[in-house]
Image: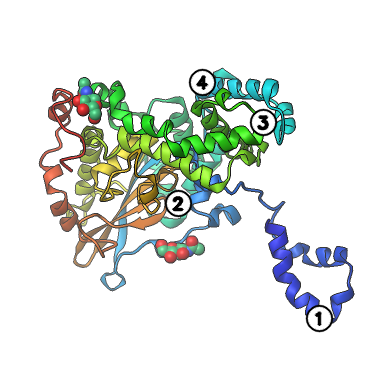
Amino acid sequence: MRPLLLLRRAAVPLTTAPLTAAPLGLILILLRPACSSGPPPDIPTIAPYFGTKTRYEEVNVRLQRDALSVNASALRAPRAERCVPVHLTAVIRHGSRYPTAKNIRRIHKLADLVRTEASRGPGDELRRWDMWYTEDMDGQLVDKGRDDLRLLARRLAAMFPSLLSEENGRRRQIRLDSSSKHRCVSSVEAFQQGLHQSWGVKDVQYSHQVNDELMRFFERCRGYVEGVENNRTALVEEEKFKWGEEMEGVRRRMAERLGLPHHRLTPDLVEAAFILCSYELSIRSLHSPWCFLFDEDDAKVLEYKSDLKQYWKRSHGHVISSLSSCPLFHHIFRTLDRAGRPRRTEEAPPEPASILVGHGETLLPLLSLLGLYKDQTPPTAQNYNTQHSRSFRTSRIVPYAANLLFVLYDCQRGPRLQMLLNETPVQFPGLDGQDAPLYRDVRANYRHLLDGCDFYKECEVKPGGRGPNTEL
Ligand SMILES: *[C@@H]1O[C@H](CO)[C@@H](O)[C@H](O)[C@H]1NC(C)=O
Ligand SMILES: *[C@@H]1O[C@H](CO)[C@@H](O)[C@H](O)[C@H]1NC(C)=O
């Protein structure tokens, strides 16, 4: 699509000029310099709907042209108050990764089915498709995922040069914590490589620590594990949607495109084809033939199914999911309290940055606890048609390398705090209209959590003793 568009746009002045008779080849040559770098990206139209398997550059499209571009207008402290950033806390999801073993097994099953039974359409190309995923890849970070984190580190270093500075790095004042999972440890290493690249320093001495208490709080919260994670009825909305009319339509259309008997294609295999398209794009930058099994409307249905799962498993669907992130919430505010405390000039400057690398499962509960992306009507199996403009869209919120930034500024009227999600400003619910409210107003806004949100109390409550979706 891209080169065609470029050609058409640029062709307007050309064809009205005396060049009209120039052969197409010449026009193409003339146009070559306009197509700046490399081959044109060939991105499936369904790429923005991959839920938690969405690429970061689908959310920040400018990065497709320049992966290091920084949008300075995203920093919004009031100019008149001469604000200076004094601390950055970043909660970051790992980068692009391989499918989990469970999904690799599903992809195998799908490829086998298509090879042996599909009778038409893209079937030929799909039959020849090389199944290159092996179970040992199980969720590990891929090269593209390392790039995700290196590039993010370089953009953040450009946005906050005084905080993520070489000097602060050398003095070990940039604190780095990671989940113990392989993909997160690889991500926090890549982040440090990115910082060193922006400082022009060759050897990287890693200085992160593993901290599952902060980054994998969910598996330590008994109320969550028993009440949601291991509770089949907790995800009943996703289960109902899986067998509902919208999914049925996607399944029927896919079976027709493949010339497969309808009953052979289960919803799990439909989903396997969808995520296969996502993985071929996010791992190998390929527009895979599997993508042609879906149109944009199909993709929206599949995105909704994955949003239902995340909403009821990790977000507002069950209050305990948000509350399980209390340790991380308190950690962040303690760090901000320390950084914003008035100090005498001879005192050591505050910790400039805290980088916390975890999972989508780390970010979603925290965002929910902060009150973000909570629509008036919860998404359910029945209301797909009224949910098109919902704010809870995991494709936008938790793509690979998703990041929630807390930027503390020192300003004339006192410290101010700004929040950014995926490098775009977001406002604190309850403090609408302010991009960087006074820190004391943010604290007052979250007083109920700062004074409570007790992990042990919340998590040891008998599961089932708390109704869904009531308290926050
Ligand atoms: C930069 O950010 C501002 C607001 O955050 C947004 O309106 C604008 O479109 C962004 N520019 C680019 C090039 O992304
Ligand atoms: C499982 O989830 C359902 C639906 O949210 C809830 O009503 C029930 O109490 C939960 N069961 C347990 C054992 O927590």
Q: Secondary structure under badge 3?
A: loop
Residue 287: percent from left, percent from top: 65, 42
> Badge 4 is on which residue?
101
Q: Residue at x 65, y 36 (%)?
A: 257
Q: Is residue 263 toward the left or the right of residue 1 in the image?
A: left
Labels 1 and 4 touching (C-beta < 8 A)? no
Q: Secondary structure under badge 2?
A: helix
Give neighbour class at mark 2: few <14, some 14-19, many 20+ (Cα, 10 Å): many
- The answer to which quarter of the image holds residue 80 is bottom left
Labels 3 and 4 touching (C-beta < 8 A)? no
Mark 2 or mark 1, which has the lower sequence index?
Answer: 1
Can you say which quadrant of the picture contains the N terminus?
A: bottom right
Q: Amino acid at mark 4?
A: Ala
Can you say which quadrant of the picture contains the C terminus?
A: top left
Mark 3 or mark 1, which has the lower sequence index?
Answer: 1
| Of the two numbered discs 3 and 4 in the rendering, the one whose residue sits closer to the viewer | 3
- The answer to which quarter of the image holds residue 358 is top left
Question: Label 3 vs label 4: CA separation?
Answer: 28 Å
Q: Amino acid at mark 3?
A: Gly
Q: Amino acid at mark 2?
A: Ala
> Badge 1 is on which residue?
17
Mark 1 or mark 4, which has the lower sequence index?
Answer: 1
Give neighbour class at mark 4: few <14, some 14-19, many 20+ (Cα, 10 Å): some
